[in-house]
Image: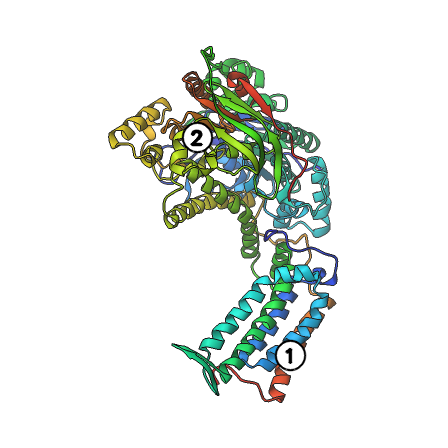
Amino acid sequence: MTSAAASIRARGWGWRHAGRSTWVVSGLDLAVEPGERVLLLGASGSGKSTLVHALAGVLGGDDDGERRGELLIDGRAPDAARGRVGLVLQDPDSQVVLARVGDDVAFGCENLGVPREEIWRRVRESLDAVGLDLPLWHPTSELSGGQKQRLALAGVLAMRPGLILLDEPTANLDPDGVIEVRDAVRRVVESTGATLVVIEHRVSVWRDLVDRVVVLEAGGGAVADGSVDEVLRREGAGLAASGVWVPGFEPAAPARATLAGSSRLLHTEDLSIARVASTVLHTGIELELASGRMLAVTGPNGSGKSTLGLTIAGLLPPAAGAVVVEGYPDQPVRWKSRDLVSRIGTVFQDPEHQFLTGRVSDELSIGPKALGMPGPEIARRSADLAERLRLDHLMHANPFTLSGGEKRRLSVAAVLATRPPILVLDEPTFGQDSRTWLELVGMLRDLLDDGTAALAITHDPEFVSALADDEFRLSVPEVVGG
Amino acid sequence: MSVMTPVAGRQAVYRLNPVAKVVASAIIGIALVISIDWVSAGVALAIEGVLFLWSGLSPRRFFLRTLAVWIAAPLAGFTILLYGRPSGAVHFQFLFMQVTDGSIELAIATVLRVLAIALPAVVLFVTIDPTDLADGLAQVAKLPARFVLGALAGLRLVSLFLEDWRSLELARRARGVGDSGRIRRLLGQSFALLVLSIRRGSKLATAMEARGFGAPGKRTWARESRLGRGDAALIALGVLVAAAAVSASVITGHWNVIGA
C-alpha cells in the first residue's frame, strides 16, 4: 500500500476568521519534505488546528475567513489535493460516519471514486494496519474511544494519502487508548512512508515517533523549528509555561498541608450501581468520603466510574444499598435539586453539559440564586471566583465560545459558588494543558486543605499522586449491555 | 434497540431491497386510502395475515413491534363510532356523540383499514437497515448522494443526542435548577441540546469533508444496491394485494371513494 509521500510548502501564509480583527496565523514560512514526521507545538490559540485544517482543505471558503500568502501540497492548493491528505480529529464520537466498521472505512474511497473490488481490498488492509481485528459488520457504536480513533485512521489510510494529519488524536482517550492509537500511527507511517503532521500538547506521546518539531506562535509564524531534542532544549521552558507538557518540565504539584483531623461526611452501605435500572454494574461497594481528603476512583473505560460518581452525587438512584450523608436522614437522590446544590457539588466530564446560560457571569450566579442568596453576596462570590480562576476578563463571554481550559475552569467555579462541603469531579484534568492542570490542582489543594471532601474520577496518574489520599479501583463489570 | 440496529435475521425478507419494501407498502397504502369500505380493507388484511408468516419476525416480535398499531386502530375506530357521519338507526346519543348503523360500519372499516395499511408498512420497515435504505435510495431510486448520505450520517448522531439529553437532565439537577417548572426546564434543555447537536453536526461535517465527501468527480458505491427477482416478487405481491382488495370491493358493490 504505497503512494508517494507529499510535501508541504507555506510562504507568508496566514488566516483570519471572518469577523475577527486578528490573524490566527500570519507570515508562516514552512517547508516539509516528503516522508518527514513533524510534531506541531504551541500554546492554545497559536493556530495549530487552523494550519492543519487548511492543509486538509476543510478550512472553508471566502465566507469563512480571509487568507494570504501561499500554502501548497505537492505544489497544488490543498482543495485540489483531495485524497492526498487524510485528517484525524480529536473527538472520537464525531468522526464515525457509518454504522458498520467496514462501511465506515470504505466511505472515503467511495467519495474518491475507487472501484468496488479495490475498495474492499483496501478496507481489509487498512483495518489490519491499524490493528482493528473486527468483522466488517461490527457496529461502530460499540467501539471504545481508542478503537474509534483507529477506525478513523483506517478510513484515512484507505484513501492512500501522501500526508497524514492528526489533530490531537489522543486527547480524549484513556492511557491505554493513547498507546493503542500511537502504536497504530507508528505502524501506518512506517509501512506507507507518508508525511506526518501531528498536533499534541503531550510531547512524550509522540517524541520517539517524530523527527522534527515546529513551534507556532499566536498571530505569528513558526518561532522554532528543528530536531526534537534541539527544540525542547531551547524552547522547553517557554513551551511548558504556555501549557505544553514537555518532558523534563512537568508542572510541580503544590504540597498538601498535613491533616489536622478529619471527619466522615459521606459513606456507602452495600451500594449497587446501575446506569440504567436493568443493568447492575457493581454490587457491595463500601467507600467513604471524609473532610479534607480526596478519594480517587480509577479503572479502565467502561468500568462504571462515572455511574458510581453520579450515584454518590445524588443524581442516579442506587440499584441497591444506600448513599448516606452524615446528618441527613434521606439519601441524596431524594433531596430537592435546590438542597443538593449546597451539599454536594458535581463537576461533569464534559463542561458543555453543565452550562445553562449564555454568559459566564450568569453561569457563576445560578447556584447562589437557586439558594435565594441576596444579590450583593452573589455578585461578591462571582467576582471572587472569577478572579481566582482567571475568568474575570471573560464575564460577558458566552461559555460555549471559551477555550477547553477556560470551559473547565468555569465549570469548576460554577460549582464552587455554592460552597458544597462534598465535591464529585469526573475527569477534571482530562485533555487539559499543563497550565490549566496546575491551576486545577492548586485550587483543589486549597479546597481540601479547607476541609472539603472530594471524590475524583480520573485516569491521570500525576493527578492521583498530587492530590489523592485514597484510591478506589473499579474493574470492568462482567455483565455488559442488557 | 435503536434506529441504527434494525431487526436482523437470515430469512428472505432481510435480503430484499429496502426500496422494494417502500414501494410495496406504498402501493397497498394508496389503494386502500382511496375507498373507505370494510370489504377492501378486510380482503387486504386477510391476504396480509397469510403473508406475515414470511415476515421474518417471531409472533412475539411481530406483536411487540406492531403494538402501537394495535392500540391506534381501535382508538381511531372508537372515535369514528362516536363522531362518524350518522346514518341509519340511532343506538346511542349524548351531546355530539351519536352511534348509528352508519357510524358502526365506518368504525369497523376504519379499524380494518388502519391495520391493513400500517401492519405491512411496520413489518417491512423494521427489517430495513438504514445503511441499506440509503444505498437503495441513492443507487436504485437515484436520489442525490449528498442528501441521502448526509441524512444517514445525521441519523447516527441520534443515539449521541439521547446520551447528551440524559447528561443535561442530571446536570440541571446538580446545579440546583432541577425543581422548577417542567415546561420551562424542557425548553431550556431543548435549547442546550440544539446547541450541542449543531456543534456535533459541524464536527461530523468536517470529518466527512476531510474524507472527500462532496468532492467533484464520480462517487462509487462499496455496497451494490439493485432490484432482484425477490424484490420484483415483493412489489408484485403488493400489486396483488391491492388489486384483490379493490376488485372484491367493486364486485360486491361496497367500493366507496372518499368524498364521492
Element on which disc 1 rests: helix
Q: State whether residue A407 is above or below residue A19.
A: above
Q: Is any atom of residue B185 visible in this view?
A: yes
Describe the element under mark 2 as helix, strand or loop.
Answer: loop
Tell me the residue that label 1 is attached to: B43
| Three-letter code for the amino acid on which mark 1 is drawn | Val
Neighbours of disc 1 within 10 Å: few (<14), some (14-19), many (20+): many
Q: Position of B223 compared to B79: left or right?
A: right
Q: What's the residue type where badge 2 is placed?
A: Tyr
Residue at 36 percent across and 28 percent down: it is A417
Q: Is residue A411 left or right of residue B232?
A: left
Q: Chain of mark 1?
A: B
What is the count of numbered marks? Answer: 2
Q: Is residue A34 visible?
A: no
According to the image, label 2 marks what residue? A328
Location of residue A460 in the rendering, given as x and y in whole percent from the top left corner: 55, 23
Q: Is residue B51 left or right of residue A95?
A: right
Name the outermost residue toward the left. A376
Instruction: State which quadrant residue B95 falls in.
Output: bottom left
Question: Residue A231: percent from the left, percent from the top?
Answer: 53, 17
Residue plotted at (34% across, 25% down): A385
Dividing the image into 4 quarters, which one contains the N terminus of chain A? top right
